[in-house]
Image (cartoon, helix red, strand yellow):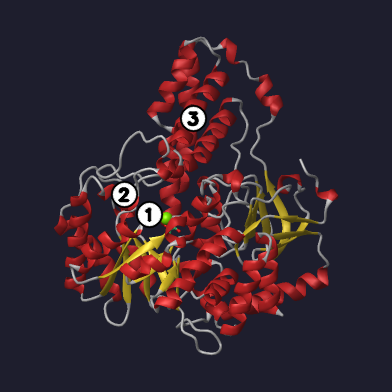
Amino acid sequence: MVTQTSTDQLLGTPVVPGLATGPALVVRSEISPAAIEAFDGASLDEEAALRAYDDAAGAVAAGFERRAGSAHGAAAEVLTAGAGLARDKGLRIAVRKHLRSGEDLLSALAAGVEQFVGVFTQMGGLMAERVTDLRDIERRVLAHLVGEPEPGVPTPQEPSVLVAEDLAPSDTAGLDPTVVVALVTERGGPTSHTAIIARQLGIPCVVGTAGAMGLRSGTRLLVDGSTGVVELDPDEADTARRVAADREVRAAVEGWTGPGRTTDGTSVKILANVADGESAAGAATGPVEGVGLFRTELCFLNRTEEPSVEEQADIYSDVLSPFSGERYVVVRTLDAGSDKPVAFATHDGEENPALGVRGLRLSFDNPGLLERQLDGIAAAAERTGTETWVMAPMVATVAEAAGFAEAVRSRGLKAGVMVEVPSAALLAHRMLEVVDFLSIGTNDLTQYAMAADRMATDLAHLTDPWQPAVLQLIAITAHAGQEAGKPVGVCGEAAADPLLACALVGMGVTSLSMASAAVRSVGARLGTVSMATCEEAAEAALSAPDPQAARAAVLALLEG
Ligand code: PEP
Ligand code: MG
């Protein structure tokens, strides 16, 4: 473990911009080893041990349900899902199996959970993310068994910086941004649960921070969510000045009303990423010119049968209708597979699903799936009168792009493809000969360019869109768009980073699409820089040796 005395600052991956200061509140999830030692599991026979497990798991579930009762929206859903996992029959069967084979209760609990961790990890993607939830349940059940309080996030007595190994959804559900001013985690990447929650709450967040768990609670921290620097015991006067300046920036962000443009008037479309009618209605109330990514597969994650064309048209109309008039919506066809299995579409048992039959590839042996979806989209576009563009995910060859474009255009819609596979970026100029627009999915483009699973918490330094190789691929794509005179947008998480967004615009990107929560900070930042500065920022980022240097160079240019 790195101790805090060895350095006066720690460095992590910045995921939510902003400066915040406060004492560290270090969340430790271990349970007292003495209590575990004192637990006499061997004295329980199989039946008594299973009863003790049921009581402990039941108490954990009841605790989640109680908190769910007083929570709302996503927080309530997360807590209800936690209760479900604690009561999971499969987990109970696994524990019982180990008890039957003669193991004592604590070993049976550990082995049962391990078995599930193995299964979830093997499945990869979103399922692998559930490992954090499972470990959380394990610690809570263990705490009940050995008579300790359940571990978790204590309520801070004063505005504090929460420091943790990584945060489980149950830790962050209901987190109060008035007392938690920033989040710092030792593990986790830009797409981790912690990052998503911090983005929703709008609090500065740094993940993958080596040495964070070596901090002592009470140490004063200054967290910079733009650079990833966490300063220990910072100078008070300097901190007060910088935090006040940041507050001004945040006030400008709150007051940003669009449209997106640089100080010299270059227009950049600021768009929202949405998942369904509800999120589209919410996004439509914000200062966006439309939707840059409608992830249609998210509407069908729990469906076993393919919805009819009519039902699809209804679902898509709910997303399109709030944007009728001057605005437009980019609908992405099913990106099922890998971390987003959809029962009626995806292939089972793939060895390496991220490199398997996902996205557009599902239509290779099932063309009807794509045809029916396009019919549903076209019907929704006609019904709502909303300008509708359609793009395909996971396109690797020009022939795939051409075939897709033909199918989309035959329905009178504008056709594009996502640039997520490095081959598509390298051939962007040829892709643009056959499609109307490109949209760069930096989450997958980074994963495939760096050969690093986007969900792997230990690879956050590689799954960083500021990596020089990823920036080169983006620049090639944007340049091809400029030459062809066709739009090239970015719709991955990179677009939500205000600093990187300016560099992307400097490379020639014409639209930025992001979670609604990020729209104002990106739009406001872009409104403070000229196109010439954006171009310099692009140059600086592209020639930097690594992500840290690239961020520092762009920050210096933008604030210099
Ligand atoms: C991306 O890969 O950047 C993207 C926007 O698609 P998704 O995150 O849905 O895979
Ligand atoms: Mg993707």
Residue 467 image position (x, y, % from top left) = 60, 58
The answer to whether the beta carbon of the residue marked 1 is less than 8 Å from any atom of ligand 2 is yes
Q: Nearer the viewer, residue 269 or 169?
A: 269
Mark linked to residue 394: 1
Seen at 50% across and 38% down, the residue is: 131
Q: Label 3's element?
A: helix
Task: Look at the numbered discs 2 and 3 and tell me whether their residues touch, using CB distance below 8 Å.
Answer: no
Instruction: Give the number of the mark in front: 1 or 3.
Output: 1
State which quarter of the image contains the C terminus.
Answer: bottom right
Badge 2 amino acid: Arg
Q: Nearer the viewer, residue 299 or 457?
A: 457
State which quarter of the image contains the N terminus.
Answer: top right
Q: Earlier in the sequence, mark 1 or mark 2?
A: 2
Seen at 77% across and 70% down, the residue is: 239
Q: Label 2's element?
A: helix
Q: CA distance from mark 1 to mark 2?
A: 7 Å
Name the residue carrying label 3.
118
Q: Quadrant of residue 195?
A: bottom right
Residue 182 image position (x, y, % from top left) = 64, 60
Mark linked to residue 361: 2
Instruction: State whether residue 465 appears in this view.
Output: yes
Q: CA distance from mark 2 to mark 3?
A: 28 Å
Badge 1 amino acid: Met
Task: Look at the numbered discs 1 and 2 and tell me whether their residues touch, using CB distance below 8 Å.
Answer: yes
Seen at 42% across and 44% down, the residue is: 355
Q: CA distance from mark 1 to mark 3?
A: 28 Å
